[in-house]
Image (cartoon, rainbow, N blue to C red):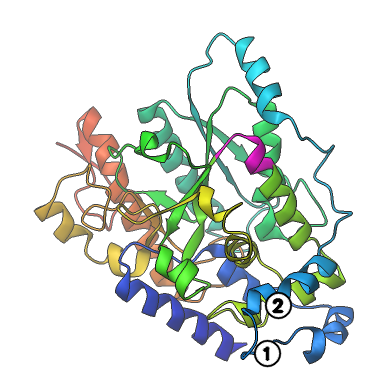
Amino acid sequence: MALVLLFILGTIRALYSSSPVVAASSSQVRATRRPLSAEQQQQQQPEIFSFDPGSMDPIEQSKPRMEALMNRTMSLGPKISDWDSRRSSRRRKIKQCEKRMMLVTSSHPKPCENPLGDHIMLKSAKNKMDYCRLHGIDMFYNVAKLERSLPGFWIKIPLLRAVMLSHPEFEWILWMDGDALFTDMTFRIPIRKYEGYNLVMNGWDHLVYGNRSWTGLNMGIFLIRNCQWSLDLLDILAQMGSDGPGSVGIGKILHVTLFGRPDLESDDQGALLWLMNAERERWGAKIFLEHSYALSGFWVPLVRELEDKMRRFEPGLGDDRWPFVTHFAGCEFCEGWANYSPQDCRRQMERAFNFGDNQVLEMYGFRHPSLNVADVDRT
């Protein structure tokens, strides 16, 4: 296990060094902590999938096996195939039918194991509420597990589907992990930039399609359009993530075909990356890989330089000079473990929170005298 974790962190750091605003998603880290049952361990046979490197592309070779392992009986609800027309009809009945956005996030349904976890999650929620209030974005905070057959880090899949169907008035849904904070409160998402796309996430084409790197994109923070294409994608991802014998086999396919992915059961980020390469015209062509601003800035190199950023730059940039979002991947604040020092995770999370909070407090004549303290002074 330790070797696997070190490998993941090395991959993340190597990617960050060449791409300054990427972060590994929480699912990448959590997947290493999810123990396999005895039945699943028995099913981990090396012959479940192998490929001939001298023959066709590995992902092409894996398609028949992937099709056989996907849980086609898995359903997030009644099958919907005409959502675009139904949504359009419902929107006409709603007075406020302009393009709008909703932020969706989630946390554990039970109290955190870490005694400080609930306090940290409260600050994370406050940070998101502040940004949404400043930019006219609605927010939905979920604490329920909506689908028992999907592991915890897949919770976003049924939740996003439920939000889309319940709120046809929202054109875009912004998913944000609980361990991510807005650190540029004035930066506006350039939504018009994404006309013709249905999914926007932090990533790079050469890493996703060239290297097929597991850390070439990030599913911790992303924008997804409320449309039929998105419902279809969520349905397929659910079939790839459902608990059961197929989960182990799918994980092995992802391990063999994606660079840097450890041998684990299926995960949402690996599943999406496989789909983008297996059916690029259907899925990849509608996904915008954003790297012009920090949609998911990896916290380690960012938060230690916040004071320098405050001296040299102004908010509104959104990139690594003044990051839009800082993602604390590898810091599991609620469950009590972390791939980094828990003390460092907590301290740097507080600093990033105060960095963003200052931009709000200054509107009311206050600010934190230091990013290291919760106290405030009058400006």
Q: Are marks 1 and 2 in contact (CB under 8 Å)?
A: yes
Q: CA distance from mark 1 to mark 2?
A: 8 Å
Decide if residue 344 is on the left or right side of residue 56.
left
Instruction: Place residue 256 in its image quadrant.
Output: bottom right
Nearest the camera: 124 or 315? 315
Please state which amino acid type lies under the numbered disc 2. Answer: Gln
Instruction: Place residue 50 in its image quadrant.
Output: bottom right
Q: Is residue 225 visible?
A: yes
Query: Tag 1, which secondary structure?
Result: loop
Nearest the camera: 368 or 164? 164
Decide if residue 210 is on the left or right side of residue 108.
left
Question: Where in the figure is residue 126, as x and y percent of width and height?
Answer: 45, 40
Q: Earlier in the sequence, mark 1 or mark 2?
A: 1
Residue position marked by numbered label 2 in the rendering = 61
**Dot label at residue 52:** 1
For residue 368: magenta? no
Q: Residue at x 56, y 52 (%)?
A: 118
Q: Which residue range is magenta in the image?
A: 225-231
